[in-house]
Image (cartoon, coloured by chain):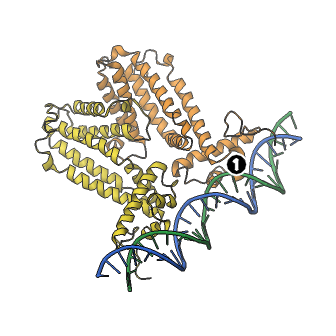
Chain colours: A orange, B yellow, C green, D blue
Amino acid sequence: MGKNPWQSELHWRREGQQDRAHKTQNRVLDAAETLFFEQGYDATSVQDVAKQAKCSIGSVYHHFRDKKAIALALFDRMTREFELTMREAMDPARWNGAGIADILHEFIEFSIINNKTRPGFKTAALEAVRLDPSLGDHFPQMQRKANKQLKALLLARRREIGHPDPAFACGYVLDLLIALLRARFDPHVQKSQLSRLSNKKFAERALSLACSFLQLERQEQANHA
Amino acid sequence: MGKNPWQSELHWRREGQQDRAHKTQNRVLDAAETLFFEQGYDATSVQDVAKQAKCSIGSVYHHFRDKKAIALALFDRMTREFELTMREAMDPARWNGAGIADILHEFIEFSIINNKTRPGFKTAALEAVRLDPSLGDHFPQMQRKANKQLKALLLARRREIGHPDPAFACGYVLDLLIALLRARFDPHVQKSQLSRLSNKKFAERALSLACSFLQLERQEQANHA
DNA sequence: ATTATCTATAGATCTATAGATAATGC
DNA sequence: ATTATCTATAGATCTATAGATAATGC
């Protein structure tokens, strides 16, 4: 019997020893990412995942303890990617000389791109939490952390802000932008006037709304873009 | 064999002849509304629904052709309720003497209440569309219609609006409010600063944001509330 | 007499495992 | 020698139906 293969760092995924092991695991996760997003976790059978990953169902179960483990490993993979991106993006050094408008502009652009390339992120997170409620705080916490860092970047430039309560205003503006982005990109949401605008126009309007709410004084827009 | 019992107006639901038939059907739909919202359609078995509705699985299948039919009938029931409410709420006669701020205030309050009493509405709609893609436009169309009527109510008061493009501004403001409401009430969304505000504060801020975007001239707020 | 309800179960998945076969890399 | 892959299948649901029993209301 030897040691329990599931007692690795990620207890739900086998620690592969060969090269093809890692490749197969990633193919399985890619397949799951696609299918869980398109059809949902419950409506996707492990057989479906195996087929899409071009391997057998036995192989899937060799690498993942059970179906749930696939979803959890997928969430883990996405989380790592997201945190890596955030660490880079939020580095204060990157933003020397940039104004609030620049930062918000970049945030909007980044979110638009991210929503296109990783449409299944939110779905995967929700599924993971449903399957393992002990994860319940992980995703919100991660987002809250990103929000906090972003807010700090803005507040470091509070001289630009005309709003009487800069701390509140920054938080509110970020919530507002996130809400707008979701309204536009979440496929679960009705198509509205927001989705009829071009990406460019949408970004423009969102930015100008945010700037006017903050009552920015010097509109030093996009001088590094 | 007689005539096909499913060939009624709602082809997925049996036309009940007795009193208890209607009661049972409604109990089944109530059960489905609860369980589909809590666990999702796929994760809920027909057995679960029968148990929650306090009837047998055979009874469920007597009234509904298959599991899918339950979800479609539920969507149908919710849609009818929603349209009825809308018809009343949007009646222009109801709004004689009211200003834009009054209307928006009421819209926000109504949405808050509705989100509490019918949390499963959106979920049910999404499930219905997933099960029968030919319904794909029904829900967005309904929302678009409601939006249009609301927009008309606002535009009938365009004298109050200072924004240079009132038509665009009204559409944008409604999208904005809907996005904010979703960000606050959609359980699928992270808790943010928005959810930490009290309902009253939240409504206040949202309203004031909307009014300032429209550049309302006479702020005749809540003179009938 | 007709309609609604119940119990029991056939048949179709779907998850997960067992055991045989093939590939890897020390 | 060890690790990964495959095929075949046991066992657990879950959907949907058949057929018997009970309630309704003309």
Q: Is residue C20 toward the left or the right of residue B23 in the image?
A: right
Q: Residue at x 39, y 15 (%)?
A: A157
Residue B98, compared with residue C22, is above or below; it is above
Toward the viewer: A14 or A205?
A14
Pointer 1 indicates a residue of which chain? A
Q: Residue at x 68, y 40 (%)?
A: A13
Toward the viewer: B92 or B111?
B111
Query: Where's residue A140, x and y in %?
Result: 48, 33
Residue at the spot of label 1:
A61
Q: Residue furthest top?
A: A159
| Residue A102 makes an appearance in the image | yes
Toward the viewer: A77 or C17?
C17
Q: Residue at x 45, y 23 (%)?
A: A148
Residue B25, compared with residue A52, is above or below; it is below
Residue A88, compared with residue B84, is above or below; it is above
Task: Pick the quarter of the image with the N terminus of chain B.
Answer: bottom left
Q: Is residue D24 toward the left or the right of residue B85 in the image?
A: right
Query: Where's residue A121, x and y in %?
Result: 52, 39
User: Which element is circle 1 on?
Assistant: helix
Q: Is residue A140 toward the left or the right of residue B122 in the image?
A: right
Q: Amino acid at mark 1?
A: Tyr
Toward the viewer: A159 or B79?
B79
Count of marks overlaid on the render: 1
Task: Pick the quarter of the image with the C terminus of chain B.
Answer: top left
Label 1 CA crowd tier, 10 Å (few <14, some 14–19, many 20+): some
| Residue A56 makes an appearance in the image | no
Query: Where's residue B147, x and y in %?
Result: 27, 47
Query: Where's residue A87, x and y in %?
Result: 54, 24
